[in-house]
């Protein structure tokens, strides 16, 4: 029996209505449009409404992906949600999203926390589970409301992040010439202190003092993260190409995590690929964590930048520090 491949049947994304520009941020923290743009390439980001949750954004992206795939929630038997900002610490956001969408109760539903690499981790996980033959249709969502965990008084972090969600629908295919070719995942666990939320977990539960000190907000050592991010994205991209005996110039389109334009440009230089082969929307969305790659994927599709037979390279890094890459033949 010929082995099956896992293909993407549909894509979708959602971005909150509110646009927060650099000039608006400059009214509340000591920064400027020029300072932010020259260091990150970001001009604006989307911010969820106070009553708009991660699951709300995820549901909107999922509905778009299901419609694109020509399926309904009743067809889904596997739901994986990549997020670091679930609606509640317990239960998983996936269970809340399952209920909101009307996905059957026999479906497997769980969250995956790999920060900004979460979508690629989830994509590989779902592909393997579909490949087992026990699941037919998977819904993979990357969704984060980072505005809820950002200290809006700390300019080194608050200028970088935004909110949003992206989703894909996966299924098995008999066509060996299309689908997810493979993935390369990893983590630098010795670098957890570079990007973290210090308090609020089981090791350091939140207290009135920790909340007053802002220790339940994200903390980042920007220069160190930048260096390791460039290294991780370059190495994981090279590794997966070598693993599948491909050259960088065979890649039709690179869809990178949208953390910082300077990081994307560095990866472009290392791979010796022109920037016109990279999808870049960080200027409009900022860093949306796990939503970053699927939003960029959906935008590229809708813009006609992805054609049948194209070879796509997805690459990301995130807190942990996690990293990952995936190759897809469209």
Image (spheres, helix red, strand yellow):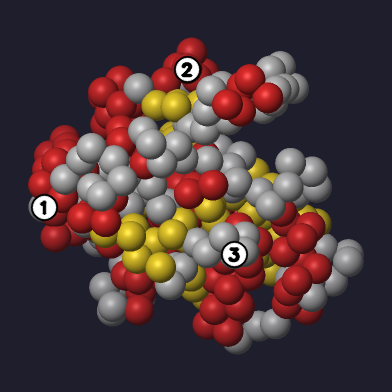
For the point 13% across and 54% down, the residue is 275
Residue 104 position, x and y percent, is 84, 71
Circles 1 and 3: CB atoms closer than 8 Å: no
Q: Position of residue 61 (x, y in %)?
A: 55, 71
- Judged from the image, the secondary structure of the residue bearing numbered disc 2 is helix
Real-space Cα distance between discs 2 and 3? 30 Å
275 sits to left or right of 298 = left
The residue nearer to you, when weighing 49 against 299, is: 49
Name the N-terminal-most of marks 2 and 3: 3
Marks 2 and 3: which is nearer the front? 3
Task: Tell me which numbered mark, 1 or 2, is placed earlier along the sequence.
Answer: 2
Name the residue at 36% across, 33% down: 154
Q: Which residue is mark 1?
A: 274
Q: Which residue is mark 2?
A: 193
Left or right of 3 in this view: 37: left
Task: Give the residue pinned by disc 3.
Answer: 52
Q: Nearer the viewer, mark 1 or mark 2?
A: 2
Number of residues whose C-alpha sits closer than 10 Å to that of mark 2, classed few (under 14), some (14–19) or many (20 or more): some
Label 1 – label 2 distance at C-alpha: 33 Å
């Amino acid at each position: 029996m010929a082995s099956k491949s896992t293909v993407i049947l549909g894509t979708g994304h959602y971005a909150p209505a509110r646009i927060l520009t650099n000039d608006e941020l400059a009214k509340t923290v000591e920064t400027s449009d020029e300072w932010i743009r020259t260091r990150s390439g970001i001009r604006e980001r989307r911010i969820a409404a106070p009553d708009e949750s991660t699951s709300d954004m995820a549901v909107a992206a999922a509905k778009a992906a299901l419609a694109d795939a020509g399926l309904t929630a009743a067809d889904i038997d596997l739901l994986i949600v990549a997020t670091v900002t679930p609606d509640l610490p317990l239960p998983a956001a996936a269970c809340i999203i399952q209920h909101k969408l009307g996905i059957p109760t026999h479906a497997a539903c769980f969250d995956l926390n790999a920060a900004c690499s979460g979508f690629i981790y989830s994509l590989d996980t779902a592909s393997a589970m579909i490949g087992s033959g026990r699941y037919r249709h998977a819904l993979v969502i990357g969704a984060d409301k980072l505005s809820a965990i950002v200290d809006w008084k700390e300019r080194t972090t608050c200028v970088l992040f935004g909110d949003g969600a992206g989703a894909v629908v996966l299924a098995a295919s008999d066509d060996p010439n299309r689908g997810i070719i493979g993935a390369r995942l990893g983590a630098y666990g010795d670098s957890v202190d570079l990007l973290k939320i210090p308090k609020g977990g089981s090791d350091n539960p939140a207290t009135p003092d920790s909340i007053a000190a802002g220790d339940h907000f994200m903390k980042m050592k920007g220069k160190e993260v930048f260096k390791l991010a460039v290294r991780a994205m370059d190495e994981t991209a090279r590794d997966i190409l070598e693993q599948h005996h491909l050259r960088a110039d065979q890649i039709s389109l690179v869809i990178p995590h949208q953390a910082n334009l300077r990081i994307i440009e560095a990866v472009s230089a290392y791979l010796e690929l022109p920037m016109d082969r990279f999808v870049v929307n960080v200027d409009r969305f900022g860093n949306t964590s796990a939503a970053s790659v699927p939003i960029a994927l959906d935008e590229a599709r809708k813009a006609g930048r992805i054609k049948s037979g194209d070879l796509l390279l997805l690459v990301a890094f995130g807190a942990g520090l996690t990293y990952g890459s995936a190759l897809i033949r469209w």
